[in-house]
Amino acid sequence: MKRTVDYIALRDSIEEWIRETLSEASSSGVVVGLSGGLDSAVSAALCAEALGTDNVLGLIMPCGSMQSDTDDGERIAGHLGIWYEVVDLSPVLQSFTGGLDDTSVLNLANIKSRLRMAMLYAHSSGRLVLGTSNYSEILVGYWTKWGDGAADLLPIGRLYKNEVRELAAVLGLPKWVIDKVPSAGLSPGQRDEEEMGASYQDIRTYFQGRDVSASATARIEKMVKSTEHKRNPIVYFNARKWMEDNG
């Protein structure tokens, strides 16, 4: 039997968790990167409802990206009624990458993500940095280590992409952002599902223990294996144990 999710109750529970998390951290609010996409919109909306719009700061950070992403980020901020700033990181990116040998799309995308996270923490000032990754992306490692993977709280970090869409409708977000093709916006024409080589539906189906195509299974398993280091704690040499054993 298919389980039915009460998304109104889920919304209320997440918002209560947000309030508790900030109270425990003695924090005054959150700062969030607004990409113009669904995940950041839902995360910001949850915090705006939980904390009040004055306690949510949105940063829109173009970084050699499309103007439409900046425009969509501003549209979301306007819809939610939150404070926002546009911080153009393109000059920083140029100075950062001028002498690089590796200017591949992947390396540049990771640099952009890390620059944005550095800017979010630079603007935190008593606020917590709000992460916007969903469960589908976390499971397969579709995020940048010390980039969008670095955050203080992840309200949708255990929701599959389709569940995020359902929650967006309950939050009253505009249809255009709910239906927007998922993209990290880190390179022109980039699309999440094309880049991953598997659909969000396939990812959810696979991790729920149901059958997906052989090609999707192979791709998902490859992603999980190659990104395991992202989900594990930092490894370190246990010098204390070595000294005890060799002292």
Image (cartoon, helix red, strand yellow):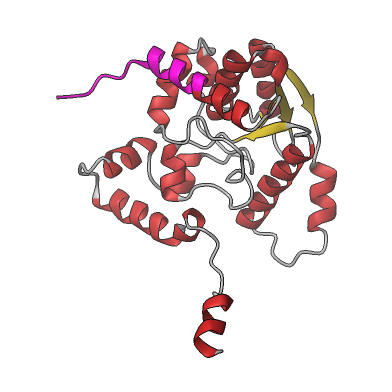
> What residue lies at 74% left-to-right and 40% top-to-bottom?
121
Residue 72 to residue 186: above or below? above
Residue 157 to residue 29: above or below? below
Tally of numbered tags: 0
Instruction: Tell me the quarter of the picture where residue 174 sits.
Output: top right
Nearest the eye: 66 or 158: 158
Which quarter of the rendering shows the N terminus?
top left
Which quarter of the rendering shows the C terminus?
bottom right
Q: Position of residue 90 (x, y in %)?
A: 80, 42
Q: Position of residue 74 (x, y in %)?
A: 71, 20
In the picture, measured across the screen, residue 238 lies left or right of residue 78, that is left
Q: Residue furthest bottom?
A: 246
Nearest the eye: 232 or 23: 23
Q: Position of residue 39 (x, y in %)?
A: 53, 29
> What residue lies at 69% left-to-right and 64% top-to-bottom?
102
Specify the segment rendered in magenta: 1-16
In the picture, measured across the screen, residue 132 lies left or right of residue 110, that is left
> What residue lies at 54% left-to-right and 74% top-to-bottom?
238
Q: Position of residue 220 (x, y in %)?
A: 35, 51
Per the picture, the main secondary structure of the magenta-coloured stretch is helix
